[in-house]
Image (spheres, helix red, strand yellow):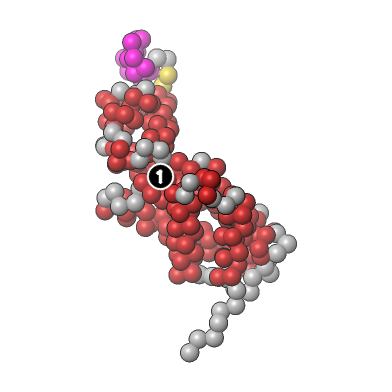
Amino acid sequence: MTADSPAHSQAGSGLWHGTARNARDEQRRRRLLEAALELHGTLGYGSTTVQTVCKLAKVSTRSFYELYADHEELLTRLYLELNDEVLATINGGGIEHAPDLFTAVRSLVSAALGPMLADERKARVMEIEAVGVSAALEQQRRATIRRLAVAVDTAFDAFADAGLVESAPKGLSSLILIGGITEALVQRVLTEPSHREPTREFIDEVARVIVLMTGPAPDTP
């Protein structure tokens, strides 16, 4: 008997192994997402198949296709879930009460990058494996970047309200900031651990660059 095969069924009850059908599907979905994180974040999306994911997740391929249209949809759901985790940390609030701008920005950077620095599989999925897969996923990525930019704008509005910065950067500044941080993170992930700076120093450096970016604007012709 496999993990997906029923011991018995109750017609019309929606039960399977004594578990409600929705709960059963959610358990399978969670196992598939965890397997995708492991495989996409180590071997890579292009080197992974639906069958490999199902084997690690202990879910049948038939059950997989009941939950996802294809392999790309699983990657997309994983990508969006990981980004929601980052957005939740940025939107968590409280960090605007820091005594100075650097401390506030460093707290923001540490919160936003923390999940990816603690588990580099997440960084690989979000910033490497999800890039260029398809036009549909690229559209999702662009929308997510805009959401991140709005979250950064909101955080800096709070810093400005707290008197930590004269004026909050907006729009293009936040997009440039996110793009720069993304590339710094990718370079870190692709560098051998023995050649990397310590995590604390990496966060400090990113925070310093952001503080420089948010200083008074130079005079322009």
Q: Nearer the viewer, residue 138 or 41?
A: 41
Q: Is residue 34 above or below residue 151?
A: above
Q: Nearer the viewer, residue 6 or 60?
A: 60
| 179 with respect to 105 (left or right) | left
Percent x, y of residue 184:
48, 57
Q: Nearer the viewer, residue 134 or 206?
A: 206
For the point 67% across and 60% down, the residue is 103
Quadrant of residue 158 in the image? bottom right
Task: Assign the N terminus to one quadrant of the image.
Answer: top left
* Range of magenta residues: 1-16
Q: Is residue 202 above or below residue 71?
A: below
Residue under pointer 1:
125
Percent x, y of residue 41:
41, 40
For the point 33% across and 41% down, the residue is 45
The answer to whether any part of residue 93 appears in the image is no
Percent x, y of residue 86:
51, 49
Looking at numbered disc 1 in the image, what kind of residue is underneath it?
Val
Residue at the right extreme?
A: 99
Is 108 magenta? The answer is no
Main SS, magenta residues: loop
